[in-house]
Amino acid sequence: MPIATPEVYNEMLDRAKAGKFAYPAINVTSSQTLHAALRGFAEAESDGIVQISTGGAEFLGGQHNKDMVTGAVALAEFAHIVAEKYDVTVALHTDHCPKDKLDTYVRPLLAVSEERVKAGRNPLFQSHMWDGSAETLADNLSIATELLERARAARIILEVEITPTGGEEDGVSHEINDSLYTTVDDAVRTVEALGLGDKGRYLLAASFGNVHGVYKPGNVVLRPELLKELNEGIAAKYGQPAGSKPFDFVFHGGSGSSAEEIATALENGVVKMNIDTDTQYAFTRPVADHMFRNYDGVLKVDGEVGNKKTYDPRTWGKLAEAGMAARVVEACGHLRSAGQKIK
């Protein structure tokens, strides 16, 4: 079953934590980038996560109306059909949704899945993200509690971001400063509000210096060992055995991260790593190369007719898909998910 059922998605996450690997969560903005992600997973023999941000969903909804729900639902329905041709299992996820977009994105999408589940079907998406990092932690967790209850009823996993990730993504931005590090107290307050699975399963995007966007290695101080401190603090407080990993962590803002930083994050309970900036570049770079190499073919220069075979979107689109798929394969290798697909 290429699109994971709720049971299979839980199994995927459990396998990742136990095996100390993580699933690449690839942001898509079109049917073409969806195919690139699926192709990359298939070539790496890795299961994975495909995700759609608010900006991506607005783009998918078309520039005439820019409706996020229409865009997200359309691509999800498309994915349920085309994923059947790929020999891997994928989960569908919605990425960062701030407070001012909850009523026009996550809540309506939850309603779609609630209706599907009432009719005896599986939810349309397997997980949704609530990004309350711009709110106070108290307000963030209050909203997360409401969303977790609805998500649980719809057999969906909720992702929460409790403290800021630096940089900017889809209009949500945070300065790069000391607030980018989640504390044990933050983690305790999260568990007090959301439980440890008893109120519904959630993924935790804790901050350890993460920054969205483009940066060179060394420009951002990542402390993935902080995740171990958070797990140990919660395990000690709630009487869990030493070495327990109460949280399912998500690694945001990973572009430019070193292999060592990624490995440390995996050892400490990261089961999902978002990848967007690098795959955007991998998709666009072959297109730029094609346009520069075929300048007089893709344009009608000096009154000529150009070359239809070079400006046909299928020609450069295939190159873009291959470039992005190769970057997904690379990500699967870095995150140790390659070869780990559910048989």
Image (cartoon, rainbow, N blue to C red):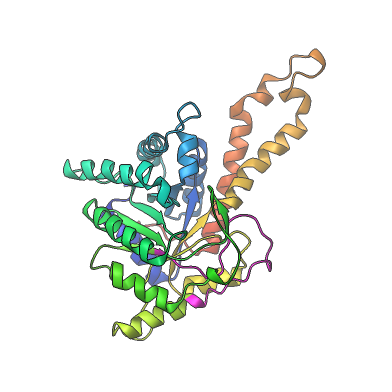
Work out whether 238 lies above or below 217: below
User: On the rendered image, what quadrant is the C terminus found in?
Assistant: bottom left
Q: Residue at x 27, y 68 (%)?
A: 197
Q: Residue at x 30, y 73 (%)?
A: 192
Q: Is residue 213 left or right of residue 2?
A: right
Secondary structure, magenta segment, majority class: loop
Q: Residue at x 52, y 72 (%)?
A: 181
Q: Residue at x 50, y 77 (%)?
A: 226
* Residue 236 drawn at (x, y percent): 34, 85
Question: In the rendered image, which quarter is residue 190 located in?
Answer: bottom left
Work out whether 135 lies above or below 75: below
* Residue 279 drawn at (x, y percent): 58, 49
* Residue 203 drawn at (x, y percent): 37, 63
* Residue 167 drawn at (x, y percent): 59, 57
Work out whether 166 lies above or below 288: below
Farthest residue in the right direction? 302
Q: Is residue 312 left or right of residue 230?
A: right
**121 or 88, which lies in front?**
121
The part of the chain drawn in magenta is: 204-226
